[in-house]
């Protein structure tokens, strides 16, 4: 079995597992919560809520930082609610109005975090679900899952400062199972994250 087939088999299991999860919408008491904001370009709406090095690299590139106050005139942003320094809810605003609400659910002593999407009234919202897996507080895997698609990212420490990165955009029932595939290395030896892309393929290369 080659590497891609190995991951296809693994991601089929991931899809089944996440699609089988059922989380209920619950109202959050924000009275004692910490609230911060992230302004974002609309083109980065799917990257902002991830926690891995690629997301941190993108935020660094576009100078996106959490702020205690919302910048005047902002219309596209994330309103992040935390309790005990843990994210529990994210209100995603588009054009100045709530577009989608993500509630966070934690499993396995907080080694897995799910962000499930809801409309502001608590009903189903058709967009990506996010899954982040941690080991000793460091992100090792992230998935974005919607219907029959999974965008998978894997992080594997190479040494103290370097981390190997793998990204697979997989649609098992699509005409082309592999939409894109990327490998690279992150270098965190300085205050700025550096990313070096090693390999990239898309469905056009198949």
Image (cartoon, helix red, strand yellow):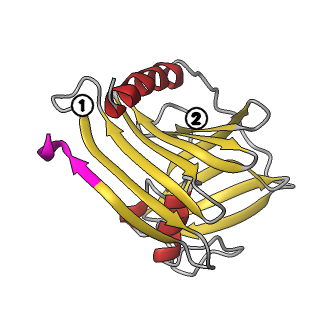
Image: magenta residue range:
200-206
Q: Which residue is mark 2?
A: 122
Report helix, strand or loop for mark 2: loop
Distance (Cα) linking label 1 and label 2: 33 Å
| Residue 70, image x, y percentages | 62, 74
Mark 1 nearby-residue class (10 Å; few <14, some 14–19, many ≥20): some
Decide: is 116 above or below 46: above
Question: For this rendering, which residue is in front, 181 or 74?
Answer: 181
Question: For this rendering, which residue is in front, 150 or 27?
Answer: 150
Which quarter of the image is occupied by the N terminus? top left
Looking at the image, which residue is at 63% across and 49% down? 139
| Residue 122, image x, y percentages | 58, 35
Which quarter of the image is occupied by the C terminus? top left
Q: Is residue 185 visible?
A: yes
Q: Which mark is residue 177?
A: 1
Mark 2 nearby-residue class (10 Å; few <14, some 14–19, many ≥20): some
Q: Is residue 98 left or right of residue 197?
A: right
Which quadrant of the view contains residue 175? top left
């Amino acid at each position: 079995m080659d590497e891609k087939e190995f991951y296809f088999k693994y991601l089929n299991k991931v899809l089944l597992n996440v699609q089988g999860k059922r989380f209920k919408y619950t109202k959050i008491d924000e009275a004692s919560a910490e609230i911060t904001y992230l302004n974002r370009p609309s083109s980065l709406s799917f990257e902002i809520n991830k926690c891995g090095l690629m997301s941190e690299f993108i935020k660094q590139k576009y100078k996106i930082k959490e702020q205690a106050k919302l910048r005047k005139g902002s219309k596209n942003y994330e309103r992040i609610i935390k309790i005990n320094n843990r994210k529990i809810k994210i209100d995603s605003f588009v054009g100045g109005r709530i577009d989608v609400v993500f509630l966070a659910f934690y499993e396995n002593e907080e080694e897995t975090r799910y962000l499930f999407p809801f409309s502001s009234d608590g009903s189903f919202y058709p967009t990506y679900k996010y899954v982040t897996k941690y080991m000793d507080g460091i992100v090792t895997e992230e998935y974005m899952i919607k219907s029959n698609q999974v965008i998978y990212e894997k992080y594997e420490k190479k040494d103290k400062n370097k981390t190997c990165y793998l990204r697979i955009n997989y649609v098992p029932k699509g005409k082309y199972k592999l939409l894109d595939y990327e490998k690279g290395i992150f270098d965190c030896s300085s205050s700025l994250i550096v990313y070096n892309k090693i390999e990239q393929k898309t469905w056009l290369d198949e």
